[in-house]
Image: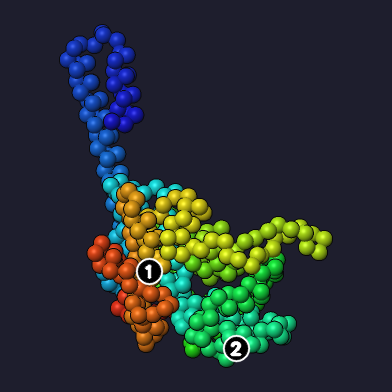
């Protein structure tokens, strides 16, 4: 009953008793009928409003994700988002708890034939070679200069030592500038496009769709924070404070008469595999309700997400499109998808087929 009905009843109780009982009863009945009519009108208006909201959501969902084919994977995602964002839904999740996490390599941009950050690091070693003549007999260095990626990978310890010598001791600002400059000019060895052009258009649309529905999107990657933060907001719309990644040691020290942050030579925390739930806990502080990955390195992140209470969703990107990108899963050293694929089948997680579910892989090429 609305306020008008309650006021009418109060008014009737305050009336004098000079009226006859029949008239008083009739007046009370009329008042009650008016009040009940008001309740019905309010309910109808509320129902109409809810119906309009549902229709608006349906229209928005129908036009969202234009680079996604009308497949089960797309429908799974849209249905989940509608369930957790619709007021009155038994699965409604408050906006503050709508946390979505995305792996980066192989999930938001390509990762073959080598993780893109490694291309950056190898180029840094090459650029520093004139200052390090002692490297000339190093097997890892020889492989790098011969563009022998497989050979360099076999010399992992020597390779990491070279990388540490190049980047350790740099200020964080100088390192940030180096990354930005490299991304402006470097190109993928086989696709011949800037690395930041090799992001997945359907995933850009998905992140925008989630944010439009009150989600907060995070990157949770095995790559380092320093490498991703300079460009994550420009490319993905994810600000640097919402990037969770592996970290090198950082010290606050005096340099050229000013206090500054300086990178150390060793990795302090590896945000991959079982490290991802730890990184989420440390940096985000909330368990995600949606997690998207593409490899066994993301398995624990998806498990951690699905272990919480309430509605949740785990998604894997399956690289099965050799024509438009790369095809690989169980038998690869970069982005291995084996155990996670098995668990997805057992637990009913959503598996995106790049070949079947995405009508477009990359955005239009920039000049």
The local secondary structure at tag 2 comes to helix
Is 307 rendered above or below residue 322? above
**Residue nearest the observer in this picture, 260 or 310:** 260
* Figure quadrant of residue 229: bottom right
User: Residue 179, image x and y in percent?
Assistant: 62, 74
Point out the residue furthest to the left here: 22
Residue drawn at (51%, 60%) of the image = 244
The crowding category of the residue bearing disc 1, from other C-alpha atoms within 10 Å (few below 14, some 14 to 19, many at least 20), is many
User: Residue 351, image x and y in percent?
Assistant: 31, 69
Question: Does residue 56 appear in this view?
Answer: no
Is 290 rendered above or below residue 90? below
User: Residue 101, image x and y in percent?
Assistant: 43, 60
User: Residue 29, image x and y in percent?
Assistant: 20, 23
**Residue nearest the observer in this picture, 357 or 228:** 228
The local secondary structure at tag 1 comes to helix
Q: Quadrant of the C terminus?
A: bottom right
* Figure quadrant of residue 2: top left
Disc sitting over residue 296 in the figure: 1
Q: Please indicate whether residue 125 sits to the left or right of residue 282 in the image.
A: right
Nearest-to-viewer mark from 2 and 1: 2
Q: Please indicate whether residue 33 sits to the left or right of residue 82 in the image.
A: left
Q: Please indicate whether residue 50 sits to the left or right of residue 200 in the image.
A: left
Q: What's the distance in space between the residues labelled 2 and 1, CA to CA?
A: 31 Å
Residue labelled with disc 2: 142
Question: Does residue 22 appear in this view?
Answer: yes
Point out the residue furthest to the right here: 257
């Amino acid at each position: 009953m609305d306020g008008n009905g309650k006021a009418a009843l109060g008014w009737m109780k305050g009336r004098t008793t000079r009226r006859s009982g029949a008239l008083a009863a009739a007046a009370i009945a009329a008042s009650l009928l008016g009040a009940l009519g008001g309740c019905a009108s309010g309910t109808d208006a509320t129902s109409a409003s809810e119906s309009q909201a549902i229709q608006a959501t349906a229209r928005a969902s129908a036009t969202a994700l234009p680079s996604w084919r009308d497949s089960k994977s797309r429908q799974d995602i849209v249905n989940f988002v509608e369930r957790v964002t619709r007021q009155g839904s038994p699965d409604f999740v408050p906006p503050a708890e709508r946390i979505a996490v995305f792996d980066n390599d192989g999930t938001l941009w390509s990762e073959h034939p080598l993780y893109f950050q490694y291309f950056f690091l190898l180029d840094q070693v090459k650029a520093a070679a004139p200052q390090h003549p002692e490297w000339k007999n190093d097997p890892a260095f020889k492989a790098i200069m011969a563009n022998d990626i497989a050979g360099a990978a076999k010399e992992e310890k020597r390779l990491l030592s070279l990388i540490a010598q190049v980047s350790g001791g740099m200020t964080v600002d100088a390192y940030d500038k180096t990354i930005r400059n490299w991304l402006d000019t470097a190109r993928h060895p086989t696709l011949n496009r800037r690395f930041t052009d090799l992001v997945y258009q359907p995933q850009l649309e998905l992140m925008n769709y989630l944010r439009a529905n009150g989600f907060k999107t995070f990157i949770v990657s095995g790559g380092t924070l320093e490498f991703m933060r300079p460009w994550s907001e420009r490319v993905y719309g994810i600000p640097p404070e919402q990037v969770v990644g592996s970290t090198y040691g950082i010290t606050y020290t005096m340099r050229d008469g000013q206090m500054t942050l300086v990178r150390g030579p060793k990795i302090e925390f590896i945000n991959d595999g079982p490290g991802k739930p730890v990184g989420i806990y440390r940096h985000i502080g909330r368990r995600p309700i949606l997690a998207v990955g593409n490899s066994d390195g993301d398995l624990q992140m998806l498990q951690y997400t699905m272990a919480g209470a309430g509605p949740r969703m785990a998604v894997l990107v399956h690289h099965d499109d050799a024509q438009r990108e790369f095809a690989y899963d169980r038998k690869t050293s970069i982005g291995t998808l084996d155990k996670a694929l098995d668990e997805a089948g057992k637990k009913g997680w959503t598996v995106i087929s790049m070949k079947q579910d995405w009508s477009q892989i990359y955005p239009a090429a920039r000049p």
